Amino acid sequence: MTTPLDDLRAHLVRALDWEEAHAGFDKAVDGLPDALRGARAAGFEHTPWQLVEHLRLAQEDLLDFCVNRDYVHDRTWPDDYWPRDPAPPDAQAWEASLAAFRADLERLKTLVRDTRVDLFAPVPTGDARQTYLRAILLVIDHNAYHVGQMVAVRRALGAWPA
């Protein structure tokens, strides 16, 4: 028999992939031509590469915050969360960023599923309001926002599937 907490954990894991109401990360990045990864669409501040790297960096930092007992927040906003270069240095960097994002997402799902983790408890290196649940919800919200931007940028570049 499942409990409401089990249901919450299952819902959070689904929400981390969140393809029920909009495109997920994989669809947003799938098939983007190499030549457009560093392209800036008219009216948009960031390129697809910058969005992918920002998603990876922010998610990596929130995961580290949750799992690293020695975590120290030493990144500076916005410089350490947004790449300066509009394009990846090469195709391998693009693929490595995608793989790292996906791996960290799987680690977050593992964290959510772990019944030893009290989702309502503060993260040890945070303050009283910075719970595991808050961190997971931040990842869900942040990823959804920027994945939506990726879709919009791809549409503006004419590179979104019909």
Image: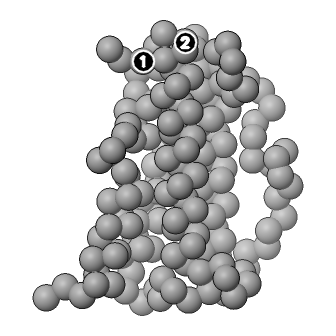
Q: CA distance from mark 1 to mark 2?
A: 8 Å
Question: Residue at label 1?
Answer: 160
Give the camera-side residue of 14 and 29.
14
Give the camera-side residue of 152 and 89.
152
Amino acid type, label 1: Trp
The location of residue 42, given as percent across then percent down, is: 67, 13
Question: Residue at label 2?
Answer: 157
Image quadrant in which the N terminus is located: bottom left
The correct choice, above or below, for 17 with respect to 152 in the image is below
Amino acid type, label 2: Leu
Q: Is residue 67 visible?
A: no
Label drawn at residue 141: none
Q: Residue at x 37, y 51 (%)?
A: 18
User: Label 1 neighbourhood size at 10 Å, few (<14), some (14-19), many (20+)?
Assistant: some
Image quadrant in which the C terminus is located: top left
Residue 26: name its quadrant.
Answer: top left
The correct choice, above or below, for 55 with respect to 153 in the image is below
Q: Residue at x 58, y 52 (%)?
A: 142
Q: Is residue 81 visible?
A: yes
The location of residue 48, given as percent across then percent down, is: 60, 26
Q: Is there CB contact under 8 Å for labels 1 and 2?
A: yes
Element at label 1: loop
